[in-house]
Image (tube, rainbow, N blue to C red):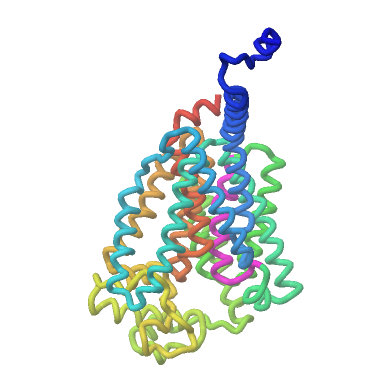
Amino acid sequence: MLTFLKCAGMAFDTPPFVGGGIEVANEGRLSRARKYFLENYNNVVTWLVCLYILILPTRFLTTIKDFLCISCLCLWFGRMVLEKKLLFKRTPLDIPILIFGALIVASIFTSISPWKTADQIRGEFLKVFAVFYFSVNNINTTRQIRTVITCVVWTSLIYALYSVTGSTLLGVHVVGKGGLIDFPGGQVAGLFINIFLGFLIASFCYTNDIRKRVLLGFIIFANIAALYVASTRAAVVALFFQLILFFRDSLKKVALVILGFVCLLIMLPCHSIWHGDDIGIRVFHDFFHKSPEELYKGGSTTDRIASYKYHLSIIKKNPLYPHGWGRFYASKRKLLYTVRSYDPLSAYLSIWFQLGLQGLLVFIFLFYKLIRIFWVNKDDENGALFAGFLLMTVGFAVNIAFGDFYGDSQALMLWLLSGMGVGLYLNPEKVKVENK
């Protein structure tokens, strides 16, 4: 009997029956689970990001968007726990982001609505830059980024086709104001189209495969049609800067871009008139000779003139005074009696109003740093990717000058994709290994 117990590994001089064997088995299972998690981590987060990008432009599915965002951040934290090290890379934007965050937090004390400012800090600062740093540290290889950009291309086609067909079947105003997604919802739609077109143009020009060029050409055409349906002149101006920047070395191409831009400018005001919008023929005269109340008529151009003049009159009293982070306007139908009754209709003017001149300068510096990083690297072995990031950032920066749309899904899309570009810039060794 004793011999049998010894052979079974359960002799009286061994540890208790319940001890070693089960603990070793548990450790083995945990080790296999840990290995499986780390081996598949990059694929899982890449596809989660692709799904996030697919639904990000929609007006609904807010809970699912938040769930995907939190899931990605939790996976990142879990990876750090399993690897027992801090997976966080320093970037050239760290100090500007910290200064920008400090100015936002400080604006609580001078805010016209401290509770509103505190709520906006969570949604439009912490979430946006959490997504940025997640991308920098987790989506930073050429294989991952190409997968995500492919998703961006197909996403642009889906929304462009929905935009064009929706406006034809349902009417542009119905779809734009209460539709399923942000297409064709005016300038918000145009902002996403500028983001998409940045990668589409770069992909079209850098590929040598004729079939891919035909497909990308069709997708670009679909997005241009969606841009026309959205009837947003700000996106056309942004697209003009994107094209001039990309084709700057070819005079013939620049001439074609300018000709196409003139044609679009001729068509868009006609489209605006068709939808009952004004085109503001006496723009400069009205700005200098009429009050905001006289200018306000409910039209696109006159609304902007009234808004610019009104907010500049407030800012002029004290350019450094922060009125608090957050968009405080309530309704465009109210007269301009209070600070909280009107949309600034320019992200830069809005940031100046919210954080003072110092906040505006830091905000502009953030865009400058992004553009510089992508510009310097646009001619290396991953030039197509950096060119896409560059055009996206330039298009976004120009577009938001004509609307207060820095925030929500638009800012998340910008910083999520920009984080990938910065991560690629910071990860040259991994890039070289993958390209061998």
Q: Is residue 216 magenta?
A: no
Q: Quadrant of residue 426?
A: top left
Report the predominant secondary structure element of the magenta stretch. helix
Q: Position of residue 329 (x, y in %)?
A: 43, 79
Vertical order, 147 against 264 (above or below): above
Q: Residue at x 44, y 47 (%)?
A: 133
Where, quadrant-wise, is the N terminus in this rendering?
Answer: top right
Q: Residue 14 or 226: which is nearer the viewer?
A: 14
Q: Is residue 426 left or right of residue 353?
A: right
Q: Is residue 396 left or right of residue 49?
A: left
Q: Is residue 182 magenta?
A: yes
Vertical order, 205 against 392 (above or below): above
Q: Residue at x 65, y 10 (%)?
A: 6
Q: Residue furthest top?
A: 3
Q: Position of residue 114 (x, y in %)?
A: 35, 74
Q: Position of residue 49 (x, y in %)?
A: 58, 48
Where, quadrant-wise, is the C terminus in this rendering?
Answer: top right
Q: In this orientation, does residue 244 appear?
A: no
Vertical order, 282 against 58 (above or below): below
Q: Residue at x 58, y 53 (%)?
A: 68
Residue segment shown in magenta: 181-206
Q: In this orientation, does residue 17 appear?
A: yes
